[in-house]
Image: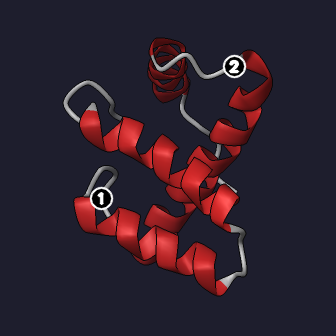
């Protein structure tokens, strides 16, 4: 599993704060971010490449992740995509 680069973690934390994600839930979002980074690395997607999000969601579905878990991952992914100009590895 890849480690989240410090600058990306800081930017992501800022996005979570801006979206009023409760502190208790943030560890879950970081988990999905790590999974997403790992997925992009493994399947050679660029971070924030729009088609990577649907591919990631399909991968989660194939791994029998619940709708709630996939929605949480999707919300975190949207933070990255909507802020792709300010979020970098």
Mark yes or no: residue 89 visible.
no
Q: Is residue 52 left or right of residue 64?
A: left
Determine crowd level at label 1: few under 14, some 14-19, many 20+ residues with C-alpha closer than 10 A: few
Q: Nearer the viewer, mark 2 or mark 1?
A: 2
Residue under the point 25% across and 59% down? 50
Q: Residue at x 60, y 22 (%)?
A: 21
- Please tell me in which quadrant of the rendered image residue 38 appears: bottom right
Q: Position of residue 70 (x, y in %)?
A: 60, 61
Mark 2 or 1, nearer chain start: 2
- Disc 1 marks which residue? 46
Query: Callout 2: helix, strand or loop?
Result: loop
The residue positioned 71% from the left and 71% from the top of the image is 65
Label at residue 22: 2
Q: CA distance from mark 2 to mark 1?
A: 28 Å
Colour pattern of the rendering: secondary structure
Closer to the camera in the image, 86 or 55:
55
Q: For the N terminus, which image quadrant? A: bottom right
Number of marks in picture: 2
Badge 2: few (under 14), some or many (20 or more) residues near its Cα, within 10 Å? few
Position of residue 75 relative to residue 23, above or below, is: below
- Position of residue 74 measured from the top left corner of the image (x, y, whole percent): 48, 53
Q: Report whether residue 14 is seen.
A: yes
Instruction: Farthest residue to the front: give it.
Output: 67
User: Horizontal and vertical percent for residue 22?
Assistant: 69, 19
Query: Residue 13, relative to residue 34: is it above or below?
Result: above
Residue drawn at (29%, 43%), measured in percent from left and top?
Answer: 81
Element marked by disc 1: loop
């Amino acid at each position: 599993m890849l480690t989240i680069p410090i600058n990306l973690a800081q930017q992501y934390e800022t996005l979570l704060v801006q979206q009023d994600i409760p502190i208790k839930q943030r560890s879950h979002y970081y988990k999905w971010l790590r999974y997403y980074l790992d997925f992009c690395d493994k399947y050679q997607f660029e971070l924030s490449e729009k088609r990577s999000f649907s591919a990631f969601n399909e991968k989660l579905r194939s791994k029998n992740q619940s709708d709630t878990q996939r929605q949480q991952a999707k919300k975190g992914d949207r933070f990255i995509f909507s802020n792709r100009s300010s979020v970098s590895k």
